[in-house]
Image (tube, grey):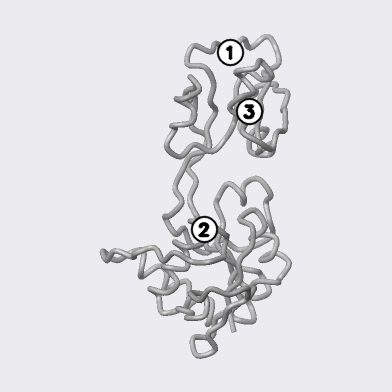
Amino acid sequence: MINVALPKGRLGEKTYSLMAAAGYDCPSILEKNRKLTFENPEKGVRYFWVKPSDVSIYVERGAADVGVCGKDILLEYAPDIYELLDLGIGKCRMCVAGFSDFYDEEERTLRVATKFPRIAAGYYESIGRDIDIIHLNGSIEIAPILGLSDVIVDIVETGNTLRENNLSVLKEIVPISARFICNKVSYQFKHPEILKLRDGLADVIGSDRQVETIRLEH
C-alpha cells in the first residue's frame, strides 16, 4: 500500500484527478463522510488530506510515502525528500513586487516583506544585496502600501491582487509548480510501486487527453 499525502484545496483535487486517470482511483474519497483516510486495496493506494504546507513534513517523516506540494514549499523548507516529477499544475511565479516606479537606492538596506524568508534571502544574496527581511504571514501586499517595506517577495498567479493595489511585478525569481515527492526510505523499500505510480502520472500529463478536475469533500 502506497500512502499518499494530498494537499487540501484545488491543488489536491487536481492531483487526485491525475492519480485517478493514472489508474489509482479510490471510490471512498468521493463519498461525503468524516473519514480521514481513504484506501483502495485493489489499487494498493491510501490517500489522506493535509494542509498544503504540511505535505513535505508528512513525506519527510515517513507518515506518507509520497505526496504533492508546490516547488515554493520545497525551496523554502528544504525537506530531505526526493523530487520525482513536475506535475505541471498549480503554476505560478515567485516574484519581487512593489510600486512600478520603485527605485532601489543601493546605498541603504532594502526592506523586504515576505512569507518566504529563505527564498528571499537566497535571491538577494545571489545578487549581493543587503536586505532587512520582515517575515509576515498574512496578505503582504499591504506592507509597501503602509511603508512597512520597500518591496515584497511572494507568489504571483494572475497578478490581479497586485494590480488592484497599484503594485507590479519587478522581478521574477523562479517559476513554481506542483511536484511529486517521495520519502527516501519508501523509495528504497517500495521502489517498484512508487516508480509505477510516477510513470503513470508522467504518462497522463504527457498525453493530449484532458483530465477533468474532480471536486472532492475534504
Q: Quadrant of the N terminus?
A: bottom right
| Residue 147's disc number | none
Q: Residue at x 72, y 28 (%)?
A: 134
Q: CA distance from mark 3 to mark 2?
A: 25 Å
Name the N-terminal-most of marks 3 and 1: 1
Q: For mark 1, what is the residue?
A: 104
Q: Which mark is residue 179?
A: 2
* Image coords of residue 11 (percent x, y): 49, 57
From mark 1 to mark 2, how far is it between C-alphas? Answer: 34 Å
Q: Is residue 88 above or below residue 139?
A: below
Mark 3 vs mark 2, foreground winner is 2
Left or right, residue 212 beside residue 60: left
Q: Residue at x 67, y 57 (%)?
A: 54
For this view, does 141 lie left or right of residue 161? right
In the rendered image, the vertical position of residue 58 relative to residue 128, given as above or below: below
Residue 211 image position (x, y, % from top left): 33, 65
Q: Residues within 10 Å of mark 3 (few under 14, many from 20)?
A: some
Disc 1 marks which amino acid? Asp
Residue that protrudes farthest toward the bottom in the picture: 42
Query: For the C terminus, which image quadrant?
Result: bottom right
Q: Which residue is mark 3?
A: 124
Graded by Cα atoms within 10 Å as few (under 14), some (14 to 19) or many (20 or more), the crowding at tag 2 reads: many
Ranked by sequence position, the earlier of labels 3 and 2 is 3
Q: In whole angstroms, how far apart are the C-alphas of marks 3 and 1?
A: 13 Å
Q: How many marks?
A: 3
Local SS, label 1: loop
Q: Are marks 3 and 1 in contact (CB under 8 Å)?
A: no
